Amino acid sequence: MIYLDNGATTFPKPNIVTSSVNNAMKFSANPGRAGHRLAIKASEMVYNARADIADFFGAKDPSNVIFTLNCTEALNIVIKGTLKKGDHVIISSLEHNAVLRPIEKLRKSGVTYTIAEVVENDNEKTLSNFRNAINENTKLLVCTCASNVFGVKLPFNRICAMCHQYGILTCVDSAQAAGLVDINLSNSSIDYLCAAGHKGLYGPMGTGVLIINTDIIPDSLVEGGTGSNSANYNQPEILPDKFESGTVNFSGIIGLSAGISFVRQRGVNNLYKKEMSLINYAYTELAKIPNVILYTQKPENENYLPVLSFNIKDKDCESVSEVLSSKFNIATRSGLHCAPLAHKSYNTFDSGTIRVVPSAFTAKSDIKSLINAVYKIK
């Protein structure tokens, strides 16, 4: 199969990831839950993974790296753990439901929010729109690094720096960007960084991280056993224990650390350039095919990530994606991609789109096969 659904999860995983997961599965001990040799070894492996991730993102302390099930859980911890009745939050017009839905739920209990419009290829207008959304009750900004549907990148570092001038906390969703964009928290105004482990970081599914880059710690979503201070009825306040109740995904964490090693070896900038080259080639060739609809400007600069959406005029996106799979053995994703705000911004809410996302393992010949298939379908 030609796999171009890497925006959902990267496939295949690097050999180092699968072998690391397999090796981790040989451990039967629970990290942090006992003092015997196997448990201590497992704890050391988890700590080393935590330290690797902290170093990769420039975090000041490995303890501030919180392991989660996914980026969605990380975002929920920040949103629900920092906002209360009367607070105001700003989000972008390209947010995923992982941001929109928890905020919409909080709206019913007295939290208000404003959607700031992202203007493609105009960072100054985008920044101005975020500034204009600030009011006296604004407590938090939550924005994505880039749209998971259209690849349009936000000036997230500048947005966060501006918010800090107003004393506003900042949370960035790097689900599509981590592993492709250099994010360094040591010189950033990002207070909370949320990342998916299974996309551009090439870890297993069921892995994500929240990195806390501020002294303001959210409330926990889940309470339970942490292996620490067990006589106390209350949840520990120390990090990472406060947010890691229950047994952690040991094999997934070890696999995620291996995925980050793979990204380091290939180089974040090299991966970005390679995948953007493929997306630009796809855009150029699709634009030549009659009745193919493209929704963004050509992604020729740093304002984009390697994500491309398209449609074929008068054809249902779900049907086209199914034909690409069944007749041409090409995996894409179609529909609204859990991001209705982005589709409303690009007038595709009623139609959805077909999304193509390459990875480190995608070849130019794979994109050529996609182009030929689209030409035959149209």
Image: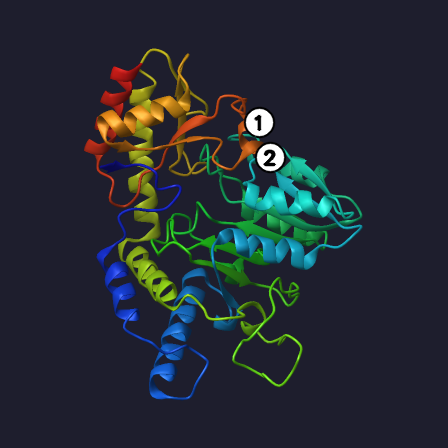
Kindly tell me whether residue 157 is visible in this rendering: yes
Residue 53 coordinates in the image, percent (x, y) = 42, 64
Amino acid beneath label 1: Lys
Mark 1–mark 2 CB contact (< 8 Å): yes
Q: Residues within 10 Å of mark 1 (few under 14, many from 20)?
A: some
The label number, if any, that marks residue 290 in the structure image: none
Image coordinates for residue 317, horizontal then vertical, percent? 41, 23
In the displayed structure, would residue 65 be above or below residue 151? below
* Front tag of 1 and 2: 1
Q: How is the image coloured?
A: rainbow
From the viewer's perspective, tell me whether residue 261 is left or right of residue 310: left
> Callout 2, which amino acid?
Ser
| Marker count (numbered) | 2
- Secondary structure state at the residue bearing disc 2: loop
Which residue is the site of mark 1? 344
* Residue 244 vertical placement versus 295 (above, below): below
Quadrant (top left, top right, bottom left, bottom right) of the C terminus: top left
Residue nearest the viewer, comparing 292 with 303 = 292
Question: Of residues 30 and 171, which is closer to you in this image?
Answer: 30
Residue 116 sits in which quadrant? top right
Q: Which residue carries the number 2 mark?
A: 93
How crowded is the residue under tag 2: few (<14 C-alpha within 10 Å), some, or many (20+)? many
- Residue at the spot x=41%, y=39% of the render? 305
Q: CA distance from mark 1 to mark 2?
A: 8 Å
Residue 122 appearing in the image: no
**Is residue 215 found left or right of 246 in the rendered image?**
right
* Nearest to the observer: residue 234 or residue 180: 234
Q: Quadrant of the N terminus?
A: top left
